[in-house]
Every structure is written in C-alpha cells, then in structure tokens.
C-alpha cells in the first residue's frame, strides 16, 4: 500500500486529492495547522479514512515530525495562503507560507531522507498560472517567461524554482504542476466563481438583492478541481520529476461566467443585480490567462473532462441546494 502526505488537506484540492488517493488504495495522511482548526472537522467528516497530523509550513520541525509519522512515498504540497487579493495586504505572511514554506518542506524531506539525496520520496509542488502574471506569451506553456503581479505570484515563483533546484541539486523526484484556475462546489467563497455561484443561488431564492464585484473583464482558463488533482497524481507516477502546465486551453471573462451562472437560474439581464465596487479591484491585475497543456496530454495522458458550462452549472446547482437547505426550504 502506497502512503501519501497531503499538506493543505483542508482546502479545495486537498479534499479531492484525498478522495482520489483513497480510491486508489493509498494510506493518506493530512497535515492540519493551528490549534482547534475548525476545518479539521470537515476533513474528518468528508474523508474519515485520512489520518490527521498537525503541523505548519512555517515550522520545519513540525514538517519533519509529520514525515516521520507518515513515512510517505509521496508528498503533495498544496498548502498556501492562496487568495491573491489578500496577498497585497499580508505580503510577509504570504511570502513565509506560500514561498518559504516550500523550502521548509523540501529541506524537511531531505533531512528525513538522511541528509543526502532525496530519492525515496516523490514531491509535488502546487505552482500556479498566477506566476505568468503580465503574460509574455499566449497561450502560456512551461517555457513561458514568468512575470508575477502580486506577492502571491512572487511567492509561487520562489517555490517553483526551489522545487526545480532540489530536483537538479539532489536528484529529488520533485514535480511542479503549473495549474491554471480550477474551481468546484468546494471552492472558497472569497474566489470570484464561488462568490458568483453562491450569490446567484441566493438571488434566485430571494435571499439577496445584489452582488458587488471588481474587474469583470479579466479572463481566466477555468477547469474543474476534480480533474486537476488527477494530473497531480499522474505527475508523481512518472519515472522522473518534471514541470507541467495543467489547463483547459479555453479562456473566459468574468462577464461570461456571469452570463452562464445567471442563465442557469433563468435570468438573462444580470446587470440589474451586479455592481462594481472599487474595493474588489486589485493594485495590479492579471488580465488574461490561457494555458497550453499539450505536454501533460502527451506525457501524462491527461485531459480535462468537465467543460466550462458544466462547471458553472455544477457550482450554481450545488449552491442552490446548500442555500435552500440553510434557509430551511
Ligand atoms: P485553498 O482551498 O486555499 O487551500 C489552501 C490550503 O493551505 C488549506 O488547507 C490551508 O489550511 C493550507 N494552509 C494555509 N496556511 C498554511 C500553513 N501555514 N501551513 C500549512 N498549511 C497551510 O487552496 P486550493 O484551491 O485547494 O489550492 C491548493 C494549492 O494549489 C494552493 O497552494 C494554491 O495556491 C495552488 N493553486 C490553486 C489554484 C486554484 O485555482 N485553485 C491554481 C493554481 C495553484 P487552512 O484551511 O487551515 O487555512
Ligand atoms: O477568483 P480569483 O480571486 O482568482 P485568481 O486571482 O485568478 O487566483 C486563483 O487562481 C490562481 C491561478 O491562476 C491561483 F494560483 C490562486 O491561488 C487562486 O486560486 O479572481 C479571478 C479574477 C481576478 O481577475 C479578479 O480581479 O476575478 C476578478 N474579480 C472580479 N471581481 C474578482 C472579483 N475576484 C474576487 N476574488 N472577488 C471579486 O469580487
């Protein structure tokens, strides 16, 4: 039985990845941070077979203890402060967790593997299309020059290159997945897709009148999180570590997301419900993301399964059910 340690188990991707690995017969360990973290209960409820360990990406000895307890064949680092807008207001802690946290886990793995090479453990780093920022090529691929536009993006670039360096310096089986935006009913409500799907459901149910948003013209390559965790696992099954773009190859604006989300509940004139609020505009914007995942397709045999319209419908349906339940209907 293979053993996996997931850092970031309480997040969107952590839960999907845990389900995937359990379905493949893995023994799965999940790292939960903090004292009395309320999300621990979510993990215990959703994936009860996961063995919960405590630790924090900023505390290297806690990572070493987690490795000793889990004795993993595979380590997935999904842990991060992942909300881009928050990263301007909290740049230092974002750098400590999202950037330096990667060095902490890479070093902990090296120490765990007796200080020499780290060939015994396969490592996945959650890199991000946010690293492309002010894009220098369309579509973006593994070789595209990085130009991050936020403290979060800069931190991810640090973690990305540190992962590559540990692969090159110590022969570590370390892979970096450059994942474009991926969403699901488990997406945090601070991200634009979930903010909209939840608001649309509430507007339809008469629980909310309007929704305040920022820039509606930004374009993202949005896929389904369940498809994307499968790509992570495939990377660690290869004979050697490498870097892969994971994306759908389509891009859509926030306006297009609004079109489909409101249409799903029978509303065509959504401008009546949406207004723009300066607080949701960013100091620097990433205007256009669209990825070329042909390397992942060729090497990993990976392809996205859920289309953009299916993703939007899935999220609005899920929020309709949740909001109805919460409203006691
Ligand atoms: P998410 O829902 O925000 O989950 C982030 C996870 O990191 C949570 O489990 C969180 O724990 C954990 N975490 C935060 N601070 C930590 C710390 N100091 N030590 C250990 N763990 C910590 O993010 P996601 O959407 O699942 O994304 C997973 C990873 O992929 C992240 O690294 C993200 O940056 C990256 N990524 C995401 C996307 C996307 O579109 N979703 C695209 C590219 C890359 P708490 O619950 O306790 O806060
Ligand atoms: O949903 P978002 O907050 O996601 P963003 O910034 O693209 O970051 C996500 O994807 C990255 C991959 O590229 C991940 F690395 C990162 O961890 C995260 O998962 O914003 C998407 C777009 C932005 O252009 C933003 O300006 O939506 C625009 N937007 C417009 N109004 C809004 C809003 N974003 C949010 N969160 N809230 C708004 O009201």
Image (cartoon, grey):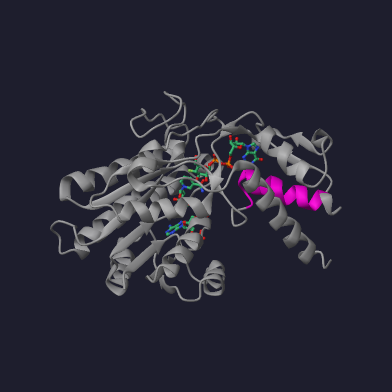
Q: Which quarter of the figure has residue 105?
A: bottom left
Question: Which of 83/21 is in front?
Answer: 21
Compared to residue 53, the image places residue 188 above or below, namely above
Q: Quadrant of residue 283?
A: top right
Residues 7 and 258: in front is: 258
Task: Report the residue at 22% width, 48% height from top.
Answer: 166
Viewer-side residue, 44 vs 122:
122
x, y percent for residue 151: 45, 38
Q: Where is 163 relative to 42, above or below?
A: above
| Residue 190 is inside the magenta segment | yes
Looking at the figure, which quarter contains the C terminus?
A: bottom right
The answer to whether residue 33 is visible is no
Give the residue drawn at x 20%, y 62%: 120
As drawn, is 244 to the left or to the right of 113? right
Main SS, magenta region, reads helix
- The residue located at (64%, 45%) in the rendering is 193
Specify whether residue 182 is in view: yes
Q: Is residue 312 above or below residue 252?
A: below
The image position of residue 241, as x and y in percent, is 26, 49
Q: Residue at x 32, y 64 (%)?
A: 63
Instruction: Indicate whether residue 25 is drawn in magenta.
Output: no
Quarter of the image that includes the N terminus: bottom left
Q: Is residue 123 above or below residue 112?
A: above
Residue 275 picture quarter = top right
Task: Answer with left or right where residue 115 lies relative to residue 243.
Answer: left
Picture quarter with ligand 2? top right
* Residue range highlighted in magenta: 189-203
Residue 101 spot, x, y in % from top left:
36, 53
């Amino acid at each position: 039985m293979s053993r996996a340690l997931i850092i970031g188990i309480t997040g969107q991707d952590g839960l999907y990845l845990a389900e995937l690995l359990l379905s493949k017969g893995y023994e799965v360990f999940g790292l939960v941070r903090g004292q009395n973290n309320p999300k621990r209960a979510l993990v215990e409820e959703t994936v009860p077979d996961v063995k919960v360990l405590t630790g924090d990406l900023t505390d290297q000895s806690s990572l070493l203890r987690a490795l000793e307890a889990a004795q993993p064949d595979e380590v997935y680092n999904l842990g991060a402060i992942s909300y881009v807008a928050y990263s301007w207001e909290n740049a230092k802690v974002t750098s400590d967790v999202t950037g330096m946290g990667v060095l902490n886990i890479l070093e902990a793995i090296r120490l765990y593997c007796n200080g020499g090479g780290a060939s015994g453990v396969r490592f996945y780093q959650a890199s991000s299309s946010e690293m492309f920022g002010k894009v220098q090529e369309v579509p973006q691929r593994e070789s595209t020059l990085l130009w991050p536009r936020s403290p979060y993006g800069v931190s991810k670039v640090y973690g990305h290159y540190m992962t590559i360096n540990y692969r090159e310096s110590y022969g570590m089986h370390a892979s970096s997945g450059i994942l474009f935006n991926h969403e699901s009913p488990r997406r945090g409500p601070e991200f634009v897709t979930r903010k909209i799907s939840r608001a649309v459901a509430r507007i339809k149910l008469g629980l909310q009148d309007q929704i305040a948003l920022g820039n509606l013209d930004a374009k993202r390559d949005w896929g389904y999180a369940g498809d994307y965790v499968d790509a992570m696992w495939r990377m660690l099954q290869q004979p050697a570590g490498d870097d892969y773009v994971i994306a759908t190859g389509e891009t859509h604006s926030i306006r297009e997301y609004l079109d489909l989300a409101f249409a799903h509940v029978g509303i065509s004139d959504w401008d009546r419900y949406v207004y723009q609020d300066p607080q949701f505009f960013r100091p620097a914007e990433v205007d256009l993301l669209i990825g070329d995942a042909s390397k992942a397709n060729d090497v990993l045999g990976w392809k996205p399964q859920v289309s953009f319209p299916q993703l939007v419908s899935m999220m609005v349906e899920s929020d309709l059910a949740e909001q109805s339940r919460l409203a006691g209907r």
